[in-house]
Amino acid sequence: MYYFGLYHWRSRLRSVLVGCCSLLAFALLRRATPSRGVRLLVAALSLPALLRAGRAGSKLLRPPPWALERYKYDALADELPLGEAARVLDIGCGTGRSLVGLAPHLSEDASVVGLDVFDSRVILGNAPLLARRNAREAGIDVTPVRGDAARLPLASRSQEVVTACRVLHDLPAEDHGCALEEIHRVCAPDGTVGVLELPIVPEGTGSDPETYWRERVAEAGFAVETVRRVERTRGGEPYIVLVAAPIE
């Protein structure tokens, strides 16, 4: 069984606590005042907090934190030579969700590095130990490395396949170019880069997501080979899959 941590756990726990406090306040006021009108007013004021608490609590206690939407990783893997790659780098692996998603497509002998800042302030449990544990459950041996996508602690031209799954949009816009240039640096001359992104672009950008990421990747020194959308099974704007090769 995989465990991918609790996403946005601080804000969700805060909502749960606020809802509990609202419920307690309503119970105390209901007992303290005989006025039905006051009780109805307090209940109306408490209702939004209680609804938020209910939604936050349900997200903490059931998927998506534990669910893996494998189809989007399959869509990326279908465009990559993962089965033949001896050295693979997954940037922004977090608790191992992308590693698990890509695992069925990797060679048993591949040397896999999972890189992340491993910051538990957003994802509770986001640490190298959990990434390694989830990868092992998926049948691959991963070396977790703590690092920044804009300053990769890896040798130049060392990775045959580099993947970045839903991570580039989390970087400040000014770091997109640096991160992609670093990916170009560590990618082998005959290597391949695969990007799986949300349909998100920085504020003030007039381009659609496909155009924005295609241009950023090309500016970093890659020849873009594939850009396509992957429809979400739960609705919403499609994911973007982009595959490119470094230009020497």
Image (cartoon, rainbow, N blue to C red):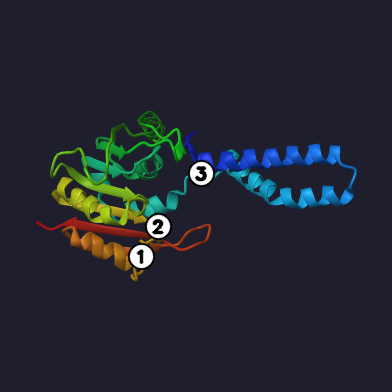
Residue 209's disc is 1
Q: Position of residue 71 (x, y in %)?
A: 43, 52
Q: Position of residue 120 (x, y in %)?
A: 42, 35
Q: Indicate which disc, 2 or 3, sits on the residue closer to the N terminus.
A: 3
Q: Is residue 23 above or below residue 233?
A: above
Residue marked by disc 2: 198
From the viewer's perspective, tell me whether residue 31 is left or right of residue 202: right
Residue marked by disc 3: 67
Q: Are marks 2 and 1 in contact (CB under 8 Å)?
A: yes
What's the distance in space between the residues labelled 2 and 1, CA to CA?
8 Å
| Between 214 and 190, the one nearer to me in the picture | 214
> Local crowd at mark 3 within 10 Å, few (<14), some, or many (≥20)?
few
Query: Which residue is located at x 78 percent, y 48 percent?
Result: 42
Query: Which residue is located at x 45 percent, y 32 percent?
Result: 125
What's the distance in space between the residues labelled 2 and 3, CA to CA?
17 Å
Which corner quadrant of the image does residue 96 belong to?
A: top left
Tag 2: residue type?
A: Leu
Q: Quick one: SS at disc 1? A: helix
Residue at the left extreme, as displayed = 248
Work out which quarter of the rendered image holds the C terminus and state it: bottom left
Query: Which residue is located at x 69 percent, y 46 percent?
Result: 50
What's the distance in space between the residues labelled 1 and 3, CA to CA?
25 Å
Tag 1: residue type?
A: Pro
